[in-house]
């Protein structure tokens, strides 16, 4: 075999590997499950005063469930999360909302997060958490 023939064989073999790899990648991507789209946002003031009322709001959506509900949770000093309030049930495709008016009696740092729950019916007794926001901190002076 001459050098030209050997190089041509290697190039054709390399092309076959590339084409085969692209075909395999397309097959894997076609068989991969679709992921639900959605988001959750929370807003709270950075600071608040003891004895004064401040508002924490959240809104979220997710297309994995027929109905949605957003709940607000809080915790102090790394303790467990406690539910503060839940908004009304909203149909999928609309923004579910929740708001809580908080008044504290003690100083320190409070953390809040929002959880979007998916429901199969408007009166579902077993909601499934779909998304959770990151915590936001409120310094209470």
Image (cartoon, rainbow, N blue to C red):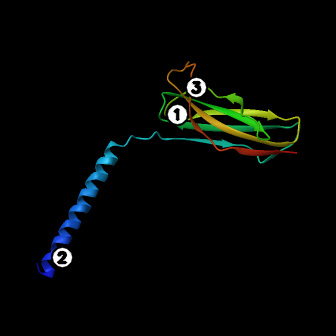
What residue is drawn where x is 12% and y is 77%? Answer: 5
Q: Nearer the viewer, residue 64 or 52?
A: 64
The numbered disc on residue 94 is 1
Estimate how packed mark 3 is, as few (under 14), some (14 to 19) or many (20 or more) residues with alpha carbons within 10 Å. Answer: many
Considering every residue shown, the one lying at the far front of the view is: 1
Give x and y (percent) for residue 23. 25, 53
**Marks 1/2: CA–CA distance:** 61 Å
Residue 106, quarter of the rendered image: top right
Residue at numbered disc 3:
89
Q: Secondary structure at mark 2?
A: helix
In the displayed structure, would residue 67 be above or below residue 25?
above
Tell me if label 3 and label 2 are in contact, CB under 8 Å.
no
Q: Secondary structure at mark 3?
A: loop
Q: Quadrant of the C terminus?
A: top right
First of labels 1, 3 by sequence position: 3
Residue at numbered disc 2:
7
**Marks 3/2: CA–CA distance:** 67 Å
First of labels 1, 2 by sequence position: 2
């Amino acid at each position: 075999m001459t050098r030209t023939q050997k190089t041509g064989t290697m190039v054709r073999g390399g092309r076959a590997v590339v084409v085969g790899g692209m075909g395999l990648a397309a097959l894997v991507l076609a068989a991969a499950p679709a992921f639900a789209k959605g988001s959750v946002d929370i807003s709270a003031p950075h600071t608040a005063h003891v004895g004064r009322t401040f508002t924490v709001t959240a809104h979220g959506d997710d297309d994995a469930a027929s109905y949605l509900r957003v709940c607000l949770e809080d915790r102090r000093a790394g303790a467990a999360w406690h539910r503060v309030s839940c908004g009304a049930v909203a149909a999928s495709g609309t923004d579910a909302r929740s708001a809580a008016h908080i008044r504290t009696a003690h100083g320190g740092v409070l953390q809040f997060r929002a959880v979007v729950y998916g429901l199969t019916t408007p009166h579902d007794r077993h909601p499934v958490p779909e998304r959770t926001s990151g915590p936001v901190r409120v310094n209470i002076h």
